[in-house]
Image (cartoon, helix red, strand yellow):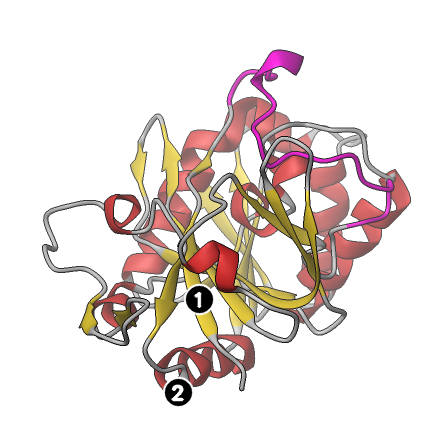
Amino acid sequence: MTNHYIHYLKRNVKIRFPKELDSPFYAEVQDLNDGFERPKYHITRRSQGPASRIKSGDVIWLFSCLKSPWGTLPPSLDAKFIVEDIQKLGDSRIKYIASQDSIWFPLSDASSLIEGLCTININGASSRLRKNKNKPLGYYLQCIRQLKESEQIAKWSKKILSSDYEFISYRIIDGSKEAFLKAQNLVAEGKVVFWDRFSLPRRLAERREIVSSDALDSYLLKSLKKAKVVWGIESPKYFVTTSYAQKECITAKNLNTYKSVQT
């Protein structure tokens, strides 16, 4: 029998280059090409409770809230980890290795989904996941919890993956705030969004680890070409001819998917 679990991880829009000492407990060395198409692993420091009951073939659903200096986005379904293997690390952490069928999700508002989810304890007793809407989701998901049923979340995930999404193209150096505000507006309208501060692996989006430039370029352009709309955040440095943003801009214009966002 496959059991389904749910966990939370805070995401942050980093403005300054993080220091090496800022690396969180779940950071692990990966190959330069890893992590773009699918998650590779999930780590917890919990060695008891639901975290200790997860077995090969089980599923971990990860939710995140993207926090920035300009506000916080509503909770979004971040990833689906189908557990292929489990490693107990020397410092009591547990590492769940993700199977080839594990997936990332684009940015969307999952608030309505979360309000309908229930979890169970070791005795099978059921309770609502989030009992008080005024408390942040992370309060209830500091630890991994087991879901009572998976039909609702499976249906939601299929809907998100089959939906058209909108891509945000911008320059980090002078367009991050406007890009966040555009993402915030789109999500509030019920749109599904590809924005690299959420849609790229955390090791790149937040920790700025070195990755393969070719793999990154390929992944971004492939994602852009599938987008229904590409929003160009037209900050002054967006138009620097040597910038990657201009490559995105030209590609989107050739596809007739480009829309301008004046700053």
- Tag count in the figure? 2
- Is 152 covered by the magenta stretch? no
In the rendered view, would you say 209 is above or below 169?
above
Between 3 and 130, the one nearer to me in the picture: 3
Q: Is residue 119 left or right of residue 168?
A: left
The residue depicted at 51 percent of the width and 26 percent of the height is 14
Residue named by callout 1? 5
Can residue 13 be seen at all in this image of the molecule?
Answer: yes
In the rendered view, would you say 118 is above or below 10?
below
**Residue 199: where, in percent of width, then height?**
58, 52
- Is 18 covered by the magenta stretch? yes
| Secondary structure of residue under mark 2 | helix
Splitting the image into 4 quarters, where does residue 230 fall?
bottom right
The residue depicted at 34 percent of the width and 44 percent of the height is 142
Can residue 263 be seen at all in this image of the molecule?
Answer: no
**Residue 128: where, in percent of width, then height?**
18, 68
User: Sequence order check: which comes first, mark 2 or mark 1?
Assistant: 1
Q: CA distance from mark 2 to mark 1?
A: 13 Å
Splitting the image into 4 quarters, where does residue 197 fall?
top right
Between 110 and 219, the one nearer to me in the picture: 110
The residue depicted at 76 percent of the width and 38 percent of the height is 244
| Secondary structure of residue under mark 1 | strand
Q: Is residue 207 left or right of residue 221?
A: left
Residue named by callout 2? 151
**Residue 194: where, in percent of width, then height?**
55, 57
Residue 47: assigned label: none
Mark nearer the viewer, 2 or 1? 1
Dot 2 amino acid type:
Glu
Q: Which residues are magenta?
A: 15-34
Dot 1 amino acid type:
Tyr
